[in-house]
Amino acid sequence: PLYHITAFALIFVAGLASGDHLVLIPSPRPPSNLKTAFENFNVTRFTGINTLFAALLEEPWFHRDLVKNVNVCGSGGAAQQTGVARRWTDATGIEIYQGYGMTECCGVMSFNPIGENRLGSVGIPVPGMEVRIVDDNDVEQPIGSPGELLFKGPTVMKGYFGRPEATAETIRDGWLYSGDIAVMDEDGYIEIVDRKKDMILVSGFNVSPNEIEDVITTLHGVVEVGVVGIPDERSSEVPMAFIVSNNPALTEEDVIAHCRDGLTNYKVPKRIEFVEDIPKSPVGKVLRRELRDMVT
C-alpha cells in the first residue's frame, strides 16, 4: 500500500521521477488479483516484498513470459529470504535486489548496487548516509561483528510529531537508532540479522529468527516460514518454526535434518508445525506476535 514507505519511495516517487506508467493493484490478496495487470501491461520494473514473491511462485497462472521485460526487480519492507530469491531467479531469470530502509529515513538507507547483487545482504549505504554498528554500551563494533544499526544523513527525520520522548530515545546526537541488529563486511555490505525485540535467547545466546528462516526456505517444498522463540525450562527459550509447504511428503524430521546441516545445534528448531498460512500484516510482514499466540 502507498502509505508504506517502501511503496511510496520505491514505486510511487521513483516512478513519477522516471516518467513511468504506474500500475497499482487495489488488493494483492489473493495473488490472482495481479494476473490481469501482468497480462495487460508490459511490466519493466517490479518492486515487492518477500511474501509476495513467494506467493506468485505458487500461482498456476504465473510464468516467465509475464516478467520477460522486467529490468529491475527490487525487494524491501521485510527480510528477503534467500530461498525465495533463488526460486524466483530460477523461475524468471531475474535477480531480486534487496534494500533496507525505514519511514524514519524517508525509505531507503541501503541498496544492492545493480550488477553487484549479494543475496542475504541489504547492500551498501546510499550516498550521503553514514552508518555505525554498536553494542548495548554504544561501543562501535569491528567489521564482521553484530550490533545495533545506527545511521544519519539528510533524509533522516527530525523527530516523531508530538512525541519528544520517543524522538529522544530514537535519535541521539543526530544518529537514528534503528532497533535492528546488523553486520557489515569488509566491502561495506550490510546484513540485517534481526530486530532486537525478536531475538531468541537460547541458553544465553542470541539467535536470529531470520537466520533460521533463511535456511529453512532453501528446503524443497517450503513456501513460507516463520520462526519465533517459545519458553523452555532448560534454555529459557528455543526456536519453533511454522511452515507452509506444497510438498505433502515433507516431514518435521526432514526440516530438522536440513537445519542441522546449515545451523549450529542450539539454533535448530525444537518444534516444527505445518500450517495453512503464516499471519502477515497488511504490508506483508510476518506477524511474529500472532505466531507466538498460535503456540499450544
Image (cartoon, helix red, strand yellow):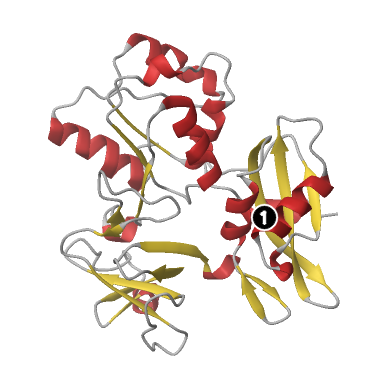
Q: Quadrant of the C terminus?
A: bottom right
Query: Tag count in the figure?
Result: 1
Identify residue for label 1: 227
Residue 287 % position (x, y): 61, 50
- State the residue lying farthest toward the front: 261
Residue 263 % position (x, y): 66, 62
Task: Answer with the quarter of the image where residue 188 lies.
Answer: bottom left
Residue 151 % position (x, y): 29, 71
Please name the residue shown 53% across and 23% down the image: 31
Q: Nearer the viewer, residue 7 or 239?
A: 239
**Rendered position, 10 above or below 45:** below
**Rendered position, 237 above or below 279:** below
Give the side of residue 68 with respect to residue 81, left or right.
left
Residue neighbourhood size for the residue with mark 1, other residues' Cα within 10 Å, grouped as few (<14), some (14–19), many (≥20): many
Q: Is mark 1 on a helix, strand or loop?
A: strand
Residue 69 % position (x, y): 29, 20
Q: Can residue 21 be seen in this view?
A: yes
Q: Quadrant of the N terminus?
A: top left
Q: Can residue 283 be seen in this view?
A: no
Give the side of residue 162 with respect to residue 263, left or right.
left
Q: What residue type is labelled 1?
A: Val
Please name the residue shown 53% across and 18% down the image: 32
Give the side of residue 64 with respect to residue 30, left or right.
left
Please name the residue shown 52% across and 34% down the image: 87
**Rendered position, 69 above or below 279:** above
Task: Answer with the quarter of the image where residue 238 lies.
Answer: bottom right
Give the side of residue 38 with respect to residue 127, left or right.
right
Q: Nearer the viewer, residue 271 or 117?
A: 117
